[in-house]
Amino acid sequence: MLASFFVVVLGLCCCFKESSQFFLGHPQLYGPNEALVKTYVEFQCEVPNHPINHEILLQIFKEDDPNRALGEYTSLEGEAANIPMVIQKRYDGYLKCVASVQNRSISYINSTSSNLHYLKVIEPVKGAQIINSGPDDFFEGETLQLICQLSAGNYISYKWLHNDQLVSPSSLRRIYNNQLTIYRTNPQDSGSYKCVATNVFNKTVFTSNSSEIEITVKEFVSTPDISFTVLKEEPQNYFAIVVCNSTRGDLPITYSLYRGNEQVINMTVEERHSVFKLPLVLDRHLGFLRCHASNGEQTTYSQWLPLHVVPVSGPVTMHYDYNTGENYAVTGLRFYCKVEKGSHPHYQWFHNKTLLQDRGTYYCVVDQMPQRSMLLLSVGRESAGTYYCEVSDSFDNSTAISSKRRYLDKEVLNRIPDFVVGVVFGSFAFLIFLMSACCWIGVIFRKRQYGEKSLWSLEMQRSKAVYEDELDFSVHSDDSDLLKAVRDNEFDQASEDSEDEWPQIQKKTLKDEPV
């Protein structure tokens, strides 16, 4: 029994010693971090604490594909393994080296793995071309989406060129990966587009340029303007030459002329305006005209225009206003000419019977049709003279109506008007009259005031005389002179001013008083 126990213990010890000798450490993987596809690259993998007299199999796997070895090496004596590989695009990602013992009898030793090693596999770009998800020719407002497609390449940067200018992202231009999207396109987005794809390996830049694609963004025709002129062919034959005009829009454009709800005529032209000819009767309203314009799915409409021609008639009025400079001197004039009636007037300006046209050294003609015409003048020696304007029908100048003539020069313009002189002198005369009236009223009032003072003084003198007569100076002979002096001073102080002004009246009054 004791012998059997000893054998078992000895076997366990031997097994423990053998297992400790065959412990397999974690391998270490070395190699480049970046490689070009289809190039030859070596990776190194070694196992520390290599078991003696045992073959170790070293294999390289992708982390996400543990069943497909990319390369392998069998280490016999613990040497580091050099594992050559021809790089493929699928090798891109995280790699690991797995070490395992080749002796299958030693089943208790598990395989071990290295730390992960990242390998970036570069495939040069090639075969760039643009794919348009829509038509190459369309109207404004649509969305344009272009895709830059490659036959090979990864880790790619994309650039887009429009008419050889770099396209910058904006709120309406989005660049995402290999796509260029332009929202709400307009005619400025027309032109050639090209994509440029690039990637880099060890500072070497690989580039692939697509061929250009031509994009046309067409303009919808703008709202047309409508107008007409009058043409006189015979003495009594008149025609309206109607013009429909658009400022923008791709050609061809179809114009239609309507009178009310009735289409009169239409035509398709390779220009942005169309001309129609209609018979006309003067001084009669012939309805309302409107232009329709279309160059695709959208139709635009002009305003309604009355077809009514009124010949020139009535008086022609001319007036002016002016600008002033230093010392209020007139430096510039604006003449205005207007006729009472007429839908198509033609204005002409004359200076000393010489026709003034467009612009000269001292004048400028500005027509504000059909309401009026304006003549701008600079005041000087050259502009002095007689001015007037004539108005006739633009389609018939056989009869013209002239305004009144007016002579103007620098002295006339800067002379004080007669009515101003009258107002100034009239105001001055009124002030003189007002001052005279005030003085006269003052004299009358003063006389009346001094007359009342004289009557009061006269009354005081009478009272004084009566008072003195009532006194008896004989009884008080000693003080009579003193009392009399005191009484005289009381009355003399009150009537001093009156006695000075009216001495004759005072003396006469005292003399006539009874004793």
Image (tube, rainbow, N blue to C red):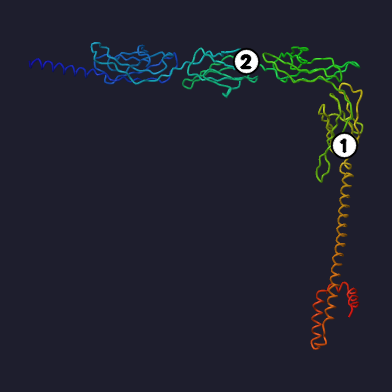
Vertical order, 360 against 151 (above or below): below
Camera-side residue of 222 and 506 = 506
Residue 425: give its label: none
Q: Nearer the viewer, residue 75 or 223?
A: 223
- What number of labels is visible? 2
Labels 1 and 2 touching (C-beta < 8 A): no
Q: Position of residue 330 (x, y in %)?
A: 84, 41
Residue 319: % across, % down: 86, 35
Q: Say few, some or many: other residues with alpha carbon within 10 Å of mark 1 (under 14 / 14 to 19 / 20 or more).
A: some
Q: Is residue 109 left or right of residue 183?
A: left
Query: Residue 256's quadrant in the figure?
Result: top right
Q: Is residue 413 above or below residue 194?
A: below
- As helix, strand or loop, the secondary structure at mark 1 comes to loop
Q: Amino acid at mark 2?
A: Ile
Per the image, the residue denoted by label 1 is 383
Towards the viewer: 33 or 313: 313
Corner quadrant of residue 311:
top right
Looking at the rendered structure, the kind of residue marked 1 is Ser
Choose top left, top right, bottom left or bottom right for residue 474: bottom right
Left or right, 329 with respect to 56, comes to right
Where residue 347 appears, as percent x and y from the top left, is: 86, 28
- Taking the view exactly as shown, the residue that stands out farthest to the bottom is 478
Q: Quadrant of the N terminus?
A: top left
Q: Is residue 496 above or below residue 77?
A: below
Instruction: List the residue tagged with mark 2.
Output: 215
Q: Position of residue 17 (x, y in %)?
A: 19, 19
Residues at marks 1 and 2, CA–CA distance in whole angstroms? 60 Å
Q: Quadrant of the C terminus?
A: bottom right
Q: Sequence-wise, which precedes: disc 1 or disc 2?
A: 2
What residue lies at 87% left-to-right and 41% top-to-bottom? 413
Label 2 environment density (alpha carbons within 10 Å; few <14, some 14–19, many ≥20): some
Mark 2 secondary-structure assignment:
strand
